[in-house]
Image (tube, rainbow, N blue to C red):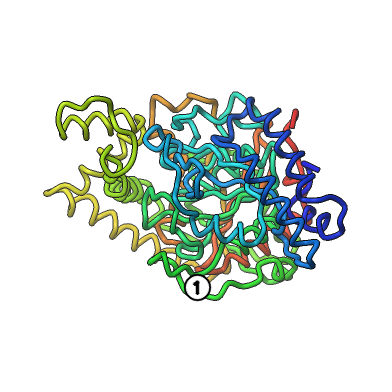
Amino acid sequence: MHQMTLAEIARGLADKKFSSEELTKVLLARITQLDPQLNSFISLTEELALEQAKAADARRANGESGALLGAPIAHKDLFCTKGIRTSCGSKMLDNFKAPYDATVVAKLAAAGAVTLGKTNMDEFAMGSANESSYYGAVKNPWNLEHVPGGSSGGSAAAVAARLLPAATATDTGGSIRQPAAFTNLTGLKPTYGRVSRWGMIAYASSLDQGGPLARTAEDCAILLQGMAGFDQNDSTSIDEPVPDYTAGLNGSLQGLRIGVPKEYFGAGLDPRIAELIQNSIKELQKLGAVIKEISLPNMQHAIPAYYVIAPAEASSNLSRFDGVRFGHRCEQPKNLEDLYKRSRGEGFGPEVQRRIMVGAYALSAGYYDAYYLKAQKIRRLVKNDFMTAFNEVDIILGPTTPNPAWKLGAKNSDPVAAYLEDVYTITANLAGLPGLSMPAGFVDGLPVGVQLLAPYFQEGRLLNVAHQYQLNTDWHTRTPTGF
């Protein structure tokens, strides 16, 4: 049962081959048995899961149907879940139980999805390795000595290890796509505003976007269908009709124009990954796609711009966690200043503190124009590059990451080295574009992903291309040894 995709589970439930309750019990037992190796879960919600599974079986017995009705999933631990700990991977929120469900959680629950638990993540979604979590690092099921990527590493590791078929995740600078690449999954960052951010604890409000992590493009389409849509509670949500993502999966790729930016293949890219990307291009050409070289000239400025904008927004968003309004409170403070300082000093880990300090500096008097304003201008240039490119091509293809997953702890002493791993993913967040990573092969036994980017609200196009590619390759079917 644990090897089934979301689509296969939907068919099995519809054909009464098994019940949601039976499947849920199997997966809960599997998580209990195997997750100690991975540390992919922060909280397991057995009682809720069995209650939701029984309710889903009753709904099916009454004639209801739906791809997510009775399907087991997990939520990244920054989606608020009513009455269940929502920690954001931080000591600051270790004892926080949300009084309401995030819109994404509520929508998926209404569709009948079964919540098995909350997955581990980098603290407040800040990191590329899932090593900054208060609850300890997550291990990559393909090699337990390596990172699974971040910040959605818990969701990625759990799905890759077949502990469950799919999970929710969020992407601020690549935090869905990079873990997907590192763990041999398909991960989709939707257009900014396509999925509600209400109830999703913010890192950088103008960059964060929720999306699905699963093994196949078909499964991502099913999960995105349940997540997407306008939400009046979220002022950044866009009132745009949600298409049937699964209906468009089988479209022909004949004549599809794929742009390959020359800037993607510089000195920083592992040549073995470059070769796998070229192999992916050849596969898509066999399916009728036309390849065209393009240029994204301002890509080189994206990392410095991102690492000004994101920390600036984080310093503002995280100011509420002060031991008074929200979050951890220190013991026996001497006065109000001591309460603030010690509560935040004890509650936040080193990476979060580093980014808050960078952000506060960039927003301070005298530096706002020099740093934050300039970074926003670069952001516009990055967006303009994409708009120019999409006048010539339908999608853009390249590597998801410059290197395969690194060893645990390898970049802890050099944060900038970890930041540079986001070079291919952050531009989509700066521009608000949809992006997808799909499995493309292996380097030294570690998975590699190929990234696809599309114009606004063209998630269906990305899923179509990825699905057709997966019908003609088998990378996405490989399972890590021992799982």
From the viewer's perspective, tell me whether residue 442 is left or right of residue 152: right
Q: Residue at x 65, y 38 (%)?
A: 447
Residue appearing at x 38%, y 67% in the figure: 235
The image position of residue 408, as x and y in percent, is 52, 25
Closer to the camera in the image, 181 or 133? 133
Amino acid marked by disc 1: Asn
Percent x, y for residue 379? 34, 58
In the displayed structure, does residue 404 sit left or right of residue 219? Answer: left
Q: Residue at x 71, y 53 (%)?
A: 71
Q: Quadrant of the N terminus?
A: top right
Q: Quadrant of residue 193?
A: bottom left
The C terminus is located in which quarter? top right
In this picture, is 158 found above or below 232? above
Q: Which residue is mark 1?
A: 391
How crowded pointer 1 is (Cα within 10 Å; few <14, some 14-19, many 20+) is rated as few
Measuring from the top left, give residue 128's x and y in whole percent.
47, 38
> Residue at (20%, 42%) from the top-left corner?
361
Residue 197 seen in the figure: yes
**113 or 362: nearer the eye?**
113
Picture quadrant where residue 111 is located: bottom right
Near-viewer residue (410 or 164): 164
Residue 454 horizontal side relative to residue 445, left or right: left
The one nearer the camera, 104 or 248, is 104
Q: Position of residue 232 (x, y in %)?
A: 43, 70
Secondary structure beneath label 1: loop
